[in-house]
Amino acid sequence: MSTFLSQIANGLMFGSLIALIAIGYTMVYGIITLINFAHGEIFMVGAYGGLATLTYWVPTAVAARWYFALPIALVAGALVAMLVAVAMERFAYRPLRNAPRLAPLITALGVSVALQEAVRVFYPGATAAIPFPNVFIEGAFVIPIGDGVVIRYTGVLLIVVSLGLAFGLERFIERTRMGRAMRATSQDRDVARLMGIDPDRVIVLTFAIGGALAGVAGVLYGGYLNNINIDMGFQNGIFAFTAAVLGGIGNIRGAVVGGLVIGLVRALGGQYLPGGTAYDYVWIFVVLIVVLVFRPQGFFGESERVRA
Amino acid sequence: MTATTETPVAPVAPPPVRHTGRLGPVLNALAPFATIGMIAGGVLSILGAFLPWVTFVLNEGAYPERASLNMFVEPFGISGFRLHITLLGIAAIVIALVKVPAQHRIVRGLGVGVTAVALLNGLWILVEGGGLGAITASDGAVAFGSVVALVGGLVTVLSATSGGLEGRPEWEWELPWWVEWILLLVIFALVLLLVAEVLTSGGQGGVVNPYAGVVFLSLLAALAGAFSALNASGLLTWVGAVSERHRVFSVVVLLVCALALPFTGAGTEYWMTVASNIGVYAATAIGLNIVVGLAGLLDLGYVAFLGIGAFTAANLSGAAASAVGIHLPFLLVMVISAVVAGVFGAIVGSPTLRVRGDYLAIVTLAFGEIFVRSAQNNIAGLTGGANAIPNIPPVGLGSFQFNESISIGPIQLPSGVMYYVAIVLLVAFVMLVFGNLKNSRLGRAWIAIREDEDAASAMGIRTGPIKILAFLIGAMLAGLAGAFFAHKTAVVAYDSFRFLESVTLLAAVILGGMGTIPGAVLGASILFVLPEKLREFADYRLLIFGLALVLIMRFRPQGIIADKHRKAELAEDPEDAAKEAPGALPTEVK
């Protein structure tokens, strides 16, 4: 019983992380129907940005106190990731706005490879996994059920921040003028332009928000696992995309639910399905394929869109 | 040589060209001096080639071993990239003086070549020599060579552009058939020598020769300039038309030329191995070309089929680590591998019945990842997991093993040459399959689906089975290549079939030109030769690869060799394409 509950907890923690990345995928896809493969790398770059700030630009005395380190790392990671995401949009995707569908997708793959390699080549020591400092209260509390379910504080932080940001973003999109502009652009870019909305601004904003959330996710990931490597972007990016599709692409609530489902599938699949943790990724992809084949619009998708 | 009617269809340089755009005023001002400018550019280029370049390695060893880049004060003894610049410069001057059709466009191609070569070598010298100081020679003589050549190249390009770029002329010469045969023979033989030269230029690379990469890239840049000039003159198109007239002859000669590669300078064991690997990926890329290029179904996990073929062959090879302890003849193994890969192809393709576009790409990616994960975990003991399946015996023909060297008369051919011959035949077979499929009823159905699936369905094409068939046939071709790959490399590990490999294959297809046969082969060659040649940049290899993908999509999304149908689809805006080539026939853009 306690194993089961521990796995549920693990799943929710991993899942809320994935959800945070998935929001970026879902927003970009919702607005310019591009699978932004490089989004996973933005998440990775955010983690390295946060780490670099803590390691190189902040006095050790400050970086050692979590109530300084956490906000600094989160903001730095978010900023770096946001800058990279916006630059990527400006220089790689915008010139291809009206190109055939395959072109931006290949570009996204290229950006993904380039970002990953850029970090590997230029970040000192990035050829191997790098230890990530503790940015939150170390330790755990125990829920006394069965043999006890151990919950780490960093995991709680992960869930709280992720869900909080997702909630805030949804309010932003539902309630503000800019949010309305984003919704309008995602429905019909040309008509939105007629209504006085500048689609370029909206798209940049979308990339910036998605990038910032991914950066936050990167720092939280580092704090949770206590080390980061350059492969983290691709793998988690694919999971996040799966989550976005699962929840119904273009839908923020869907991305969160999808992320949590992915987390649970991974944790429980690794525990209870044949093959153990070696095959946990495989189950995620199986879920993805099954969902795409039988319910391509996802959990929250409104209607099946036909995409050529 | 009777009917030598020169009938360039495109008009020759409409004199008053108004240039627009950011460089418009400059170009308009330069326009009256276009011819003089082109000549001046050519002269400057030649001058640059003869000036000293840089001498920062003077003290490090004896010329010429040390200096394959030719960075020494050595007037008149020019070779290597300085020879290339000289030749391009001379050609630019000659073309500028002689009134030939598409004169300016040809010269621009040559100028781009000079610029690229000068820039490459200059930059490399600068970086390796530790900054601008490297340009100054040690004995006080200033090594202006790279700067002068660069300026020469730029002047050539600018003045050629200012003179107004013409459309590509179309030549309609028809020679007696035997003359054309000899011509083709000579051209293909030259191509063979060129390929051997490109392959071996700069040597093996790596620690042995730190200049290999630059020497190679510089040759490539010079060739690119020469080819764009040839292309602008319309001669390449004409040769293409001639070889189209003698289709069977050309194919046979090309095949013979490919088989003759071991007899050239590239005939060493190392280059045979490189060439064989290229062949494996070329065959796989052609298979992928069916799925992506013809049927328009994006597959991001395609390398899995190569892996499935390889693992199947490895298990049937009698290797000690294989799960199935039987040793079947190679040809039978190839067939079985192809069938197994084909079955998996059909399985992977089956979601196409319900999933389209980007979502399909994700499904194929998921399948690819599942394959890698399963192989990594040694699923059912079939893949060896992290230990791989080592010691796969070489292919044997009677008592002869394919990895031995053979000698024909006095000529000793390197070991591995039989694998090369086998892969050439395999690639030829795969090309044959692709070419025939493309022009068959099935191929037309694929193209129709690619263009508009709903319309194709309305025309009575049963889209479902036909899409699955694309996956099945493509996977079978990859499976064939995989069986070969297993025996050639003697070891099959899950590591060789990761996502990046799929991306590289896709990039090969797109770089070469989607839906065309030479495109896939060319793309695979470029993408798999470059890492061999650029060993000293190994750290930056993938970074450059990623950036190159972005740039290609930005500037030439249709690939090096564009398919006629594809061209129409990928042109951002037909008006733009027409603007780029004033005087070009509208039909060319369509």
Image (tube, coloured by chain):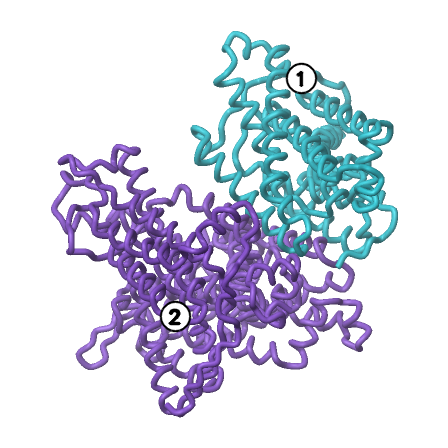
Chain colours: A cyan, B purple
Closer to the camera, A194 or A302? A194
The answer to whether residue B166 is above or below residue B432 is above
Closer to the camera, A280 or B300? B300
Q: Residue at x 42, y 46 (%)?
A: B541
Q: Residue at x 34, y 61 (%)?
A: B92
Counting from the top left corner in percent of width and height, residue B278 is at 42, 63
Whether residue B395 is visible: yes
In the image, A217: left or right of B181? right
In the image, A225: left or right of B128? right
Closer to the camera, B39 or A1? B39
Amino acid, disc 1: Ala
Counting from the top left corner in percent of width and height, residue A108 is at 60, 46
Report the chain holding disc 1: A
The answer to whether residue B505 is above or below residue A114 is below
Whether residue B328 is visible: no
Helix, strand or loop at mark 1: strand
In the image, B121: left or right of B493? left
Report the chain holding disc 2: B
Give me the disc on residue A140: 1
Do the dots labelled 1 and 2 sit on one chain?
Answer: no
Closer to the camera, A97 or A136? A97
The residue pinned by badge 2 equals B99
Amino acid, disc 2: Lys
Which image quadrant for residue A92?
Answer: top right
For the residue carrying disc 1, how many other residues have a C-alpha within 10 Å: few (<14), some (14-19), or many (20+)?
some
